[in-house]
Structures are given as C-alpha cells and as structure tokens.
Image: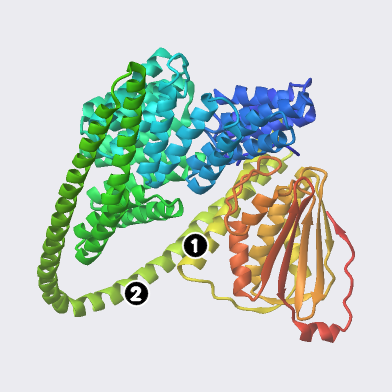
Amino acid sequence: METFIPPVLSHFPSICMLSLMLNSWIALTFRLRMTILFVLLSGTITCAQLPAIHRIKVQLNRVQSDSTRALLYLALGEAYGQIQLDSSLHYIRKSIDLAKKQPNERRLLARGLLKLGYSYRNRGDYAKALASFQKAERIQRVFPFDSTFLEIQVQAAIAHRSQGNYSKALQLALAVLQQVEKQPTRSYRQIGMLYTELGIIYDYLQQYTLAMAYHQKRLAFSKKGTHKRDLTLAYINMGAYCININRLEDAHKYYLEALSISKKFYFSGDQAVILQSLGDIAYKRNLYSEAIAYGYKGLQLQKQRGAEEYVGLACLALARSYGALHKYKRASAYVNQAGLIFESIRSAHYLQQVMEVKSQLAAQTGHYKEALQAVLKAQSFKDSLTGLDKQNAIAQVQVRYDLERKQDQIAILNKDLTIQKQVQRSMQLQLKLIQQERLLYLTTALLLALLLGISYIGVRKQKKAKQILIRQKEEISQQSQQLAELNATKDKLFSLISHDLRSPMAHLKQNFYQLRADSTASPALVKPLRQLEDQVDRILDLLTNLLDWSHSQLKGFRSYPQSIELTQVTTELVSQLADQLRQKNIVLINQIPLNMVVVADKHQLHSILRNLLSNAVKFTPPEGYVRLQATLLADQVELIIQDTGIGMNSEELAHVLTNPQVRLGTQGELGSGLGLQLSQELLARQSGSLTVSSQPDKGTTFRVRLPADVSLQNVANVYRSADYTVV
C-alpha cells in the first residue's frame, strides 16, 4: 500500500465521531477511505492541516501522470513538515524517486532535494542535509538565478551555522545577498529567510548592531507580504534578539504576537519554538517553575515532530531551570540528554552551552573538579567557534563581502580603484590589530580563570576532606540501614498493589459479566456492559504487565523451573480469551501435540503466552484466525503463534522487541507496549528466545523457544498428536 501511516495516538472521543463521518462517505473508494482514517487517527495532525492533506491524497488517487504525482508527493511532504518529520521525509523521497524518472523535471528534482535537506536539517542530521543541498545546487546551477537557488544557499548556510561553522555560513549568506542586490527589480519571498539568517549569524558573533539591522529588515519585509508564517518567524527572530540584549519586555511582546498568529493558523512547529523561548524569558526573570512548564510543552511538541536540535535545546533549558531550583538530579539528566543529542548532530555551538550548564551544576553541588573540566571544555568549544582562526576567517568573509560590494558601487559610479585599495589596506591593518588585542585578552582571561579555579578547588578540598573522614563511618551504617528498610518497604508495596488493585478489578469484571448475563437486564445495557467488561480486561492485563515488569526491574524475578506440558497452559489461556474470540468471531486452531513438555517457570510462562496470544487476538480483524503449533528441535521446543492480523512494516518490525510503538487493535483495543518487552526479558531468564516475522495486512508470526524436558518425552517415546482445537 503506497500510503504512509503515521504513528497512532489515542484520541478516543474524536476518533469515534470522525469514524462515523467516514462511514457516510460511500462515494469514496475503499483505499481512499482507509487513507483518511489513518490520517485522522494520527495525534500529531491538527484540524487546520487535515483538509489540505486530505485534498492532496484524494488527488493522488485520481491522477496517473508521474510528474503530477511527484508534485503532489512534494506538497504532501511540505504539509507534514510542521507536524511529523518522518512522514515528511517519506513523501519527499517518493517525489524524488518519481522526478528522477522524468528527464524534463530537473527543476522539480532540485526542489525535492531542497525539501529533503530541509527535513534532514530540522531533524539535526546536518551531514545528510548538506549532501542534499549540494545535489540540489548542482542541478539548479544550469538554470538562471531564481528563488529555488536562493533558498538552497540560505538553507545550506543555516546548516553550517547550526554546526558552528560561522565563517562558512556567513560566506554563503553574503554571497547570496550580493546576488540579490545585483537584481533589485526582482522580489523573492526567500529574501526574508536570508535577512533572518544574517541576523542570527551576527547574533552568534555578538555583532548586535548588524544583527538588529537585518532582523528589522526581515520584520518590515514580512509585514509587507501576505504569508502569515513569514511574519511569525520575523516576530520569533526579533524576540530572540531582544533576549540576547536582555530586553525581556520587548521579547515577551514579540513572542506573544508570534504565538497568536501560530495558534490561529496552526503552525505547531513554530508554537514549540515560541513556548521554549517564553520559558527562556521566565528563566531570566527567575520564574523557574513557569520556565519548566513552558519547557515541557515545547519539548513534547518537538518530540512529536522529531526535530532533534530543538529537543536538545528544550532539554538544555529544563536543565537550567531545575538547576536553579536545586533539583540537581533532574537537571543532570536533562543536560546529559541534551549533550547526547548535540554530540550526535555534531554541533559545537550547542555543546559549548551544554558544558557551561554542566559546569554550573557541578559547582553548585560541590564537584569543583568536574566544574573546572566542564569550563575548559566549554572554552575549547568556544575557541573552535570564535577563536582567533575563526574570527580571522569570519572577518575575512565580512571584509570580502564589503569590498566586493564597494567594488560594484565603484564600477557603477566610475570611481578611482586606488581608493578601494587604500580601504582594503586599512581594514587589513585594523584586522591585525584586533587579532593581537583579542589574543592578549583571551590568554590573560584564561590564565586568571585557571589560577582562580585551582586555588578555589584546593581550599574546598582541604575543608571537605576533614568532614568526610569524620562522617564516613556514620554514613556507611546509615546507608546500610536505609537500604534494608527500603527493600522491606518495596516488598510490602508490591504485595499491597498486587492484592488491593487486582482483586477489586477482578470482582468488578465478574459483576459486569453477571449483569450482562442476567436475562432481566435491559437490552440497551448489554453493549455498554460488554464495553466496560472489555475495558476492565485491558486494565487487568496492563496492571499485571506493569507489576511483573516493575518487579523484574527493581528486584528481579526468581525463577522456579519445572516440567510443564504446553497443552495445559495453552488450554487455560484459550479459555480465558474465549469471550474476546467470540466477540471478534476469530477462529483459534490449537495444533500443539500432547506430551510436549518444556522446562520453565509456570507463572512466567503463563505471563509470556498470555501476552503473545492477547496481541494476536488484538491485532486480528473479525473473521480471522490464530494458529498454535509446537515442534521439537533437538533439546528445545519451538512454539509458533501465527495470526492473520494487520501485521507490521519493516520499520515497526525492527523496533517491536526493543522500543515498540503503542498501537490500537482492530476494534480500538488499547495496549501498553510492555507485553513484548516483558515476554522477551522473562524468556531470557529461562534460557529461551523470542523472534518475530510479519508482513503488512498478512499477519504476524511469533516463535518462542524454550528448553525441552527430553527425559519425560523419551518416556512417552512418541508424541500423541492432539486433535485440532477450534474456538
């Protein structure tokens, strides 16, 4: 099936209403209705974006031309860009594949590569982004300078700047600006992006006068246009600039303006950035709890989009706020998470900020050696970004741009070229002077910081050494006593949860069943009672998995292996699932031979097979079937659970045993995502294994291998084949 299915989230009331609306669309084909249903189930798609995506998908099902389909896939990828980057990448790649087959669609191919690089950049994969931009540029160079070429260069500059390569970013941005200035009669929407990028680069270089000039140009340019998102981005950039120069009131006003537009037009990606920025303002105002609230909202939105760079920035902001509230454990967790993200995307600019936050946390918690190490790492990242060589390269880029611009003006006005040479020489002398002054300043500051840090750490260590020697014995005895008390408390807690939660739920399920089975009950109550009974079943299943998983993580299971005949366990489980099988009209075929004996812990084996069978029933549509088989392989028994359910694609299959996505069953059954992980962990404890194979719309097959009790099976000599058990 060509349609890409985004991850499904649970919005049950809205889904029910929308599903009823879909059933009335008789004129649409089955394939189109299924496509729209999957889109509606996605929790990341907003109401405003849904009609556009729906219209594009309807057109896709109607057109036959590969060129038109490539254009529609590209439009679909751009529509998903604000809400789900994985989906955006999927459709853009489809557009590129179709454009490659059309020799006359080189411009479309360049546009597709540009959007592919844009999505990679938003995910923080700068290497792939730059590679896509380079391919797009090679294709576009054969055509005259236009808005696509302008956007390619600007996006490449953004990628270089995000990596910390300011000189390359500035060089690209100024080169494009020079091209634009040579064509004053042309007006491109992308000029606003160029002004924004120059303003951000100068912000990072702390040249705030130039930064302010370009940000104001962008704002004025966006106010003249009709694109609301351009205006939103202009307000965001002005707000960021005001934060850098500590004009918090002005920054707050700009962000509120941007938030109002983004909410009105459902720019979810921009809303995430705005919320993070409002959190930065609250942090600077010492409103740390408010900053954390904004940070969490922004983090969730960025995680939904899959924008790694912004996820890292949100984690870094939360780390600062938790550190200010002296919640160092949470602060450390978030700053470490941010560090891993920025290391993966190789951004020296953000890694410098990570090291600065780590040094602050280490100093606040008394780890001064770690604080000093973090300070030195931050300084090394800073030197790599704005050190002498970088400053020289950046200054040369700026000088080169200024000189070329002046040369163009001189050529127009026919002025003497000697004036330009004198200007160039004077600027080179000034550059050397600035370099020498900065080198002296940096060297002096670094030496002073090192001396102060070493002396401070030495004094603190001497004071703490005496206190540690006195308290060491007392802490050891207290810790051992606390550990014993915690273990006892934990065991009591599990016992209370297991008894006080599961028993009432089981009693509640029995009451629902008796009410439904009562012949005097009103027919109108039968369906709600059955739904309530199903929900209680799911809660019991989730509670059992959570208790088993938590117990294994915190304490570890103690296995009591014994010889177990598989048919005893499977027969009991089938009887428990009989009501669900009848409701969905699913046939369960039990082909497990009698006397098939395994060595396992009975309770744990019951939990493993219960989870696997429940999954098979959950994802099998009505009128399907589930088959159970078992074979003896040397000293192991292989149990096969095969269904005719909805199956999984290759991406879902790759993560099903490590990081499964929570999906709804064929009748809206909700799972927890813990069952397969728990089953795999329990099998590993019993020298067993779990493998899975699946195909979309064809079903899934789980293979469980456990040690066989060969001695008992040899006594029987020959397996007695069980009759087919059909439910």
Q: Is residue 262 visible?
A: no
Q: Is residue 242 visible?
A: yes
Q: CA distance from mark 1 to mark 2?
A: 19 Å
Residue corresponding to mark 2: 484
Q: Nearer the viewer, residue 127 or 663?
A: 127
Which of the 4 image quarters holds residue 276?
top left
Q: Is residue 331 above or below residue 23?
A: below
Few, some or many residues within 10 Å of mark 2 (<14, 14–19, 20+) = few
First of labels 1, 2 by sequence position? 2
Which secondary structure lies at badge 1? helix
Residue corresponding to mark 1: 550
Q: Is residue 701 above or below residue 480?
A: above
Few, some or many residues within 10 Å of mark 1 (<14, 14–19, 20+) = some
Disc 1 residue type (three-letter): Ser
Give percent across and percent down for residue 201. 33, 36
Which label lies toward us, 1 or 2?
1
